[in-house]
Image (cartoon, coloured by chain):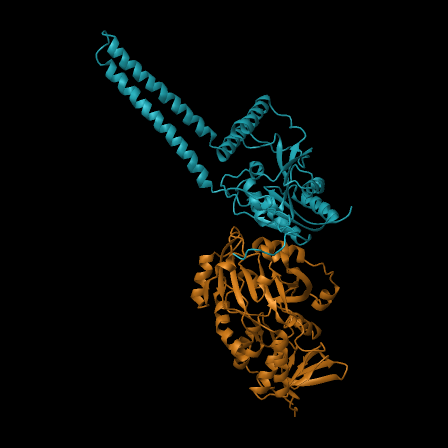
Amino acid sequence: MASRPEFDSIVVGGGFFGCSLAVHLRRDLGQRVVLFERGDELMQRASYANQARVHNGYHYPRSLLTALRCRVNFPRFVADYSECIVGDLEKYYAVGRTFSKTTAAQFRQFCERVGAPIKPAPAAIKKLFDGDLVEDVFSVHELVFDSVLLKQRVLRDLHEHGVDVRLSTELASVRSSDDGALEGTFAGPAASGTLTSTALYNCTYSRLNGLLAASGLPLIHLKHELTEMPLVEVPDEIRGKGFTMMCGPFFSLMPFPPRGLYTLSHVRYTPHAEWSDQPGQPWRDPYAILAGVERHSNFPHMIRDVSRYMPCLRACRQVDSIWEVKTVLPKSEVDDSRPVLYRENCGLPNLTCMLGAKIDNIYDVLEVVDGARPSPAVPARS
Amino acid sequence: MASSDCFASVVAPLSNDADIVRAFVTDVIAVLKANYENYEVVLVDDGSTDATASLVSAMLAEERCLRLIRLSRRFGRDIAISAGLDSVIGDFVVVLIPESDPPALIPEFIEKCRRGAGIVYGIRARRPAEPLYLSIGTRLFYWYFNRIVGVDLPRNSTDFRAYSRQSVNAITRIKDRLRYLRTFGGYVGFGGEPFVYEPRSRRARTRGRAFGEAVGLAINMTVANSTQPLRVVSLGGLALSLLSGLHLIYVLLTRLLDPNTVAGWTTQQAYVSAMFTFLFLMLATLCEYMGRLLGEIKDRPLYFVLEERTSAVLLVDEHRKNVVADPD
């Protein structure tokens, strides 16, 4: 007789996706869940090092589906995590005159089509832009979250619902045991060993292929970018506002609440290097690449380009830079869409790999998880 | 050499340059790396039909700070350079032609710019050997252009140029469809300085300009920069109109004073002279209005500001007391 696995689900990766999934499985489905995080704190990587934007569709004039999903998820996320949202952000989208893949008229029409609120920006804001390079500026409704508040909220949820969280512990590999369950091998300062579970969810973002490689499973084709987002102090007239230039080799300036600064990201200068994971090729640890790279800031490039469009930004002062690995699906290079990766039975039965690009994608993921509950472990014939 | 803290941008138009592009880019980047902390190289592919674009694309994976802009078809060298100028971010921008301009001179061009020149323009040390008619034609053109048209076009100037950020911003605001960047330099001002150098060809045989092409270029540059030929036509029209008017008076006087005038001659002559008087007058008027129209259509900025200064004198007399005797 096969014994019942110790857990219903193992969740690997303590980012926002892993944590939210663990809470969902525990709270809504009553499962026995264990969460592994190799770092000593939760939500320290991509869940922290991003522009903290709650997308409302504006970003994707070239992918209607992504824009519409944003429109659906935006109110949900804002309602569910209201205490983590930073209020009173004035957000403006500007459309470039040359080198832009969309025109002001097209952008406006796109927003109206997906139902995203849009109106002309006030004259005082338009004056901040160079009229020769910028076709038009719009006032829109987009928000930012405070990633530290979001982390506190997620910690509270995990604690409240009694999810077994193991910090500084890496789930190194996984294999199918004889009785059809999954057996994970973990190692950490507190304890090492193996445990069994019916299902395993791999939510490790840029290290998604690490677990697969260590378990001798085929890799998933993923593209990684080594990115730099300078943290800057902005001039007074910019405070409390966010700006995004559409839609080409442009930039975005957003508040970064945890540090009271602003993040500057630039399509051309934020990515420093790129590489990909390919099936059949050896896996390279993205964190090792990140740690080994020479950090030569692109801020001088960014600020020169940005101040051509908004001369007042010349006064921005760089305080720091956030360096992180950003992982995207190769598909989105072509059409700018941001689909969520959700692959079941990834080399082993009930091993699921997922990768989201935006914080509010979590709802898409949870819906898919609910639709595809793992089949109970089938005992091997004795 | 010490690395300079300014940001250097290089723009180079490419047109079927597959045979030389790799060596050119390698040279440029080596020079920039040795001299500048921050730099970028923007290559503008002007609708090449050979392997130029794919060769550069391959280099993007090897070199930092290299950018490629591909135009959808061939637009011509000046428009390709304009596309580059629209996109560069540097404090100083050097434009050079891969075939002829030596990258090793980039730091010297920029240094001149740093010392205050708005635009530093390259001057060929000597013209390549060319047939007599071309050399006479060129002399004639430069004389006409500088003296009669009145736009400053330095003799033997090339496309090898360095621009300050301020002059790039001025030039990119000119939206003329017929673009000759060499003449824009004189138009925007900001102080130009020549830089004499010896062009070196990367090819065994340089790609020269055919005679027909040179004449076409001369006509286009004149038309693009001046309504002076229209003014010549309009003045000629006025003179001819005056002549016709005089003829009319002569005809009428002859009819009155000479009893032997053949019947019908006066009517015919008077008719023709009157018509030509009006015709040339109308032509002259039309030419003048057309000239104004051309100027308005171009919609160039009225002026460019070099700098704005404010008086630094203390406005308040230190010894004057803020006390009044008469409260009214």
- A124 sits left or right of B284 in the view: right
Work out whether residue B81 or residue A89 is closer to the camera in this orientation and state it. Answer: A89
Work out whether residue A157 or residue B274 is closer to the camera in this orientation and state it. Answer: B274
Q: Decide if residue A180 is in sight here.
A: no
Question: Among the chains, which one is cyan?
Answer: B
Please tell me which residue is depicted at 33% across the width and 26% down the height of the picture: B279
Q: Residue furthest bottom?
A: A1
Q: Position of residue B77 (x, y in %)?
A: 56, 40
Q: Examine the image and state in which quarter residue B260 appears.
A: top left
> Number of labelled discs?
0
- Residue A71 drawn above or below residue B122: below
Q: Residue furthest top?
A: B260
Please tell me which residue is depicted at 55% across the width and 67% down the height of the picture: A338
- Residue A312 drawn above or below residue A141: above
Q: Position of residue A367 (x, y in %)?
A: 52, 79
Q: Decide if residue B19 is in sight here.
A: yes
Work out whether residue A183 or residue A272 is closer to the camera in this orientation and state it. Answer: A272
Q: Residue furthest front?
A: B325
Q: Residue furthest left?
A: B263
Question: Among the chains, which one is orange?
Answer: A
- Residue A208 drawn above or below residue B149: below
Q: Position of residue B197 (x, y in %)?
A: 69, 34
Q: Examine the image and state in which quarter residue A162 appears.
A: bottom right
Q: Position of residue B31 (x, y in %)?
A: 72, 45
- Residue A379 drawn above or below residue B312: below
